[in-house]
Amino acid sequence: MEAALVLVIIAGVHLPDYSDCTVIERDGWKNLTDYVVGLPHDLTELNLDNNLITGFVFPAGYSFVTHLSAMSNLLTELPDVRNIGKTLIDLRVHKNRISVINSDILDSLKVLELLHLGENLLVHFPDVSYSTPPALLYLKLYFNLLIDMPYLPNLGKSVKQLQIGNSPISHIPLKTMLVLKKLETLGGKNISAPVLPNLCHVALKAPRKLKLQLNTKLSCDCHFRWVKLLNSSSVELDAAPCHASPALNGLPVDQIGVDQLECAGRVQLTENGLKRVYTFQAVQMLQWTYCLYSNWYTCTHVNTIQLG
């Protein structure tokens, strides 16, 4: 056979010899409940979408599989794909019932570039244990039950697009964003986090604009100044109208000036053993200045203060 076989179907039966085929259509294969046996060993792509499979282990002996899709099944955990972990670059298991991610399976996916886990039942998403540079570029976790923003100091090193929208995340800690050093797009539609951490350090280091897709109500106060200071050059913002003081409620973000983004009160910081008191606005400008001049330690330190 001149070309590697691309399989577009199947699970749950033993296949006859299809050595003369390059594509096997999925017409006629319905309601499959288990993984297929007897697949050709030069298989490169497998599509098991729209069946009734509850779980499976991908067998050994397949050295060319790069794409696997099992969308719209009854999976309750991530399929065991460790046997193809060295070749798999695209794994799509969205629209299932997955509530558990086996960390050992995740660790095995050393060349994976896209992981689609949207529309599942995940409450937690783990990091990988290895510290070598990962390959993952696109991580889709939208429409899950995530309460906390995933903290991915290892896996997040390579991620360019993170989709967490339509999950009950109510807070995005700064530390979860600091590790996403190559982030270009954060999709957070319909999450309930009104305050974004100061991401000027991420935006200024990004190869392209940092794109924030948010239609939740943002607190347009001093917490939001960094977005306005960077918006024209480094940040592309897709957000719902503000809510804050009555004067700003409902106004589009692009119609609000930096000087209108204020917080009441003061905050105490310790610098070189000396306690200093700043207004919230002063702290925001410190954040901007430190980030701008790449003083990451001080930027991180100042950002960890809970303002407001």
Image (tube, rainbow, N blue to C red):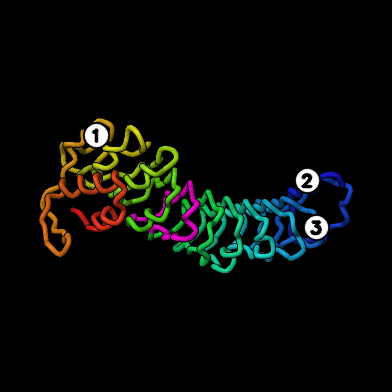
Which element carries disc 3, helix, strand or loop?
loop
- Residue 117 in the magenta stretch? The answer is no
Q: Which mark is residue 251?
A: 1
Helix, strand or loop at disc 1? loop
Q: Main secondary structure of the magenta part?
A: loop
Left or right, residue 127 beside residue 8? left
Please state the horizontal and vertical placement of residue 18, each as a whole percent of the image.
86, 52
Up-down relation of residue 239 to residue 37 (above or below) = above
Q: Which residues are magenta?
A: 149-172
Identify the disc placed on residue 25. 2
Compared with residue 245, is residue 62 higher up or lower down, i.e. above or below? below
Mark 2–mark 1 Cα distance, whole angstroms, equals 53 Å
Amino acid found under the numbered disc labelled 3: His
**Between marks 3 and 1, how big is the CA–CA gap?**
59 Å
Q: Could you say which is closer to the camera, residue 48 or residue 139? A: 139
Image check: 149 left or right of 131?
left
Q: Nearer the viewer, residue 245 or 230?
A: 230
Of the image marks 2 and 1, the number of the one nearer the N terminus: 2
Nearest to the observer: residue 75 or residue 131? 131
Which amino acid type is marked by label 1? Answer: Leu
Asked whether 155 falls inside the magenta stretch, the response is yes
Front residue of 31 and 224: 224
Say the numbered circle drawn on residue 41: 3
Binning the other alpha carbons within 10 Å of mark 1 as few (below 14), some (14 to 19) or many (20 upward) gives: some
Question: Residue drawn at (57%, 69%), measured in percent from left and top?
Answer: 104
| Viewer-side label of 2, 3 | 3
